[in-house]
Image (cartoon, rainbow, N blue to C red):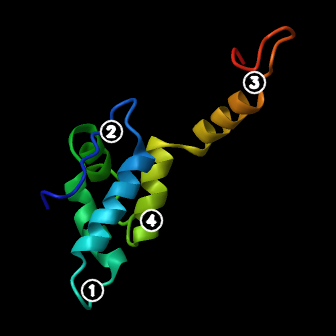
Amino acid sequence: MHLLPTFRGLVGEDPHKQWKEFHVVCFGIRPQGITEKHVKLKTFPFSLTDQAKGWLYFLPSGCITTWNDVKMQFLEKYFPASRATKIRKEISGIRQFAGESLFEY
């Protein structure tokens, strides 16, 4: 368990980085005959601390029964679709000003 990356749920933490690191560790520790999804589902709570652990513990009972449920709930909490949409709009709104060099742009 000491190999698991930790996620605290703080502003500025990257939930996608946590997700990727968690996947790599779980893939490496998976016992033969046990599915990777089962390992992830059982070990995920141990990768959370502080606010993130509180978030998980206060989810309604029964709302997480599969690994896909965990993924959807986690990403919706820490990287909601509205945030992704906002970032896409900001990126697509970037324009080079008249007289601005490519380097300055």
- Which residue in the structure is indicated by mark 4? 69
Pointers 1 and 3 in contact (C-beta within 8 Å): no
- Which residue in the structure is indicated by mark 3? 94
Q: In this view, does 81 lie to the left or right of 66?
A: right
Residues at marks 4 and 3, CA–CA distance in whole angstroms: 35 Å
Residue 59: x %, y % from top left:
35, 53
Mark 1 or mark 2: which is in front?
1
Residues at marks 1 and 3, CA–CA distance in whole angstroms: 47 Å
Closer to the N terminus: mark 1 or mark 4? 1
Residue 101: x %, y % from top left:
77, 14
Residue 55: x %, y % from top left:
32, 45
Mark 4 or mark 3: which is in front?
3
Residues at marks 4 and 2, CA–CA distance in whole angstroms: 18 Å
Say few, some or many: other residues with alpha carbon within 10 Å of mark 2 (under 14 / 14 to 19 / 20 or more).
Answer: many
Mark 1 or mark 4: which is in front?
1
Amino acid bearing label 3? Ile
Q: Which mark is residue 9?
A: 2
Amino acid bearing label 1? Ile
Closer to the N terminus: mark 1 or mark 2? 2
Say few, some or many: other residues with alpha carbon within 10 Å of mark 4 (under 14 / 14 to 19 / 20 or more).
Answer: few
The N terminus: image quadrant: bottom left
